[in-house]
Image (spheres, rainbow, N blue to C red):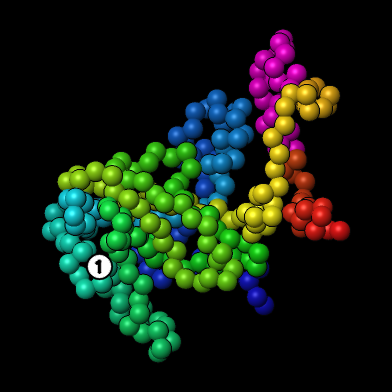
């Protein structure tokens, strides 16, 4: 029977931590007031899955080369002096060859790869990933968690229903001669499943920008509920959260994701 999961992860590196559903509290970093009133923040934090590096390691960029080390007492080894600018996860190549068909042996995905861009490095999570047909993965930095100091993550959308491969992301090291630390128990990327229809050009190009004269009576009324003085300020602050939580409890028909024009 085929797997009907929205997202399927396959762990190739045994030591890697399994992905985890992202936490609406951002692992406790969101303030309690946000947890109570700001469903926008908590929904963003909990949208998707946390992915962890397969080991604790450090990177350093000297302005020309990127070097890596697996621990404070281990030597710094340059990525850029290998033939491919890449290194394998320790002892992974042999395990990969034992697990895959013969024609894939010798082609283990690299763990770290120095990129041509200044300070750029590609990091593999140790996972493969695929999604349900019609769904993609937005790969980005973890939402509402403190960023890894000295590092910025590029963000990309991968159509993982047709592209089956290693789950990695690209980063830029921002500072020279200072170590950037990745910890195995701290997520370094967040992946978010999105329907491909959401970013189609024919949908994204369908927008307007109007003036105050075009605001409807109904919309003015909604704005008034938000802005006008209210004796119960706390209830007003929590109204949005209550409204969207009620709506979230109702199932969504797949047809609701298709624009009216497409439905005929």
Inspect this view and state whether residue 17 appears. no
Q: For mark 1, does the 10 Å Cα neighbourhood hold few (<14), some (14 to 19), or many (20 or more) residues?
A: some
Q: Which residue is mark 1?
A: 85
| Residue 232, quarter of the rendered image | top right
Residue 199: x percent and y percent? Answer: 62, 54
Residue 158: x percent and y percent? Answer: 52, 62
Span highlighted in magenta in the image: 223-246
Residue 52: x percent and y percent? Answer: 40, 55
Main structural element of the magenta stretch: helix, strand or loop?
Answer: helix
Q: Viewed as shown, does residue 141 lie left or right of 200?
A: left
211 to 133, vertically: above or below: above
| Residue 77, quarter of the rendered image | bottom left
Q: Viewed as shown, does residue 67 lie left or right of 192?
A: left
Q: Reply yes or no: does residue 241 show up in magenta.
A: yes
The residue nearer to you, when weighing 156 against 229, is 156
Q: Reply yes or no: does residue 71 show up in magenta.
A: no
Tell me the quarter of the image containing the C terminus.
Answer: bottom right
Q: Residue at x 32, y 66 (%)?
A: 111
Q: Residue at x 45, y 60 (%)?
A: 18
Q: Residue at x 27, y 53 (%)?
A: 118
């Amino acid at each position: 029977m085929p797997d009907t999961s929205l997202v399927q992860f396959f762990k190739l590196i045994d030591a890697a931590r399994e992905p985890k559903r992202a936490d609406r509290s951002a692992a406790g970093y969101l303030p309690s007031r946000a947890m109570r009133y700001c469903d926008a923040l908590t929904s963003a934090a909990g949208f998707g899955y946390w992915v962890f590096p397969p080991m604790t390691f450090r990177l350093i960029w000297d302005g020309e080369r990127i070097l890596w080390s697996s621990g404070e007492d281990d030597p710094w080894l340059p990525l850029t002096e290998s033939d491919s600018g890449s290194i394998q996860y320790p002892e992974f190549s042999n395990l990969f060859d034992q697990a895959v068909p013969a024609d894939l042996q010798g082609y283990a995905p690299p763990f770290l790869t120095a990129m041509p861009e200044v300070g750029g490095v590609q990091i593999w999570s140790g996972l493969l990933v695929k999604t349900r047909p019609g769904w993609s993965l937005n790969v980005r930095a973890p939402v509402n968690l403190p960023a890894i100091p000295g590092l910025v993550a590029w963000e990309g959308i991968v159509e993982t229903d047709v592209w089956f491969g290693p789950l990695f992301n690209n980063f830029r090291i921002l500072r020279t001669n200072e170590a950037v630390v990745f910890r195995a128990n701290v997520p370094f990327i967040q992946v978010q499943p999105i329907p491909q229809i959401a970013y189609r050009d024919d949908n994204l190009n369908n927008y307007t920008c109007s003036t105050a004269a075009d605001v409807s009576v109904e919309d003015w009324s909604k704005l008034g509920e938000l802005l006008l003085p209210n004796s119960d300020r706390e209830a007003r602050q929590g109204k949005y959260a209550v409204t969207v939580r009620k709506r979230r409890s109702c199932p969504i028909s797949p047809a609701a994701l298709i624009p009216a024009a497409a439905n005929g």
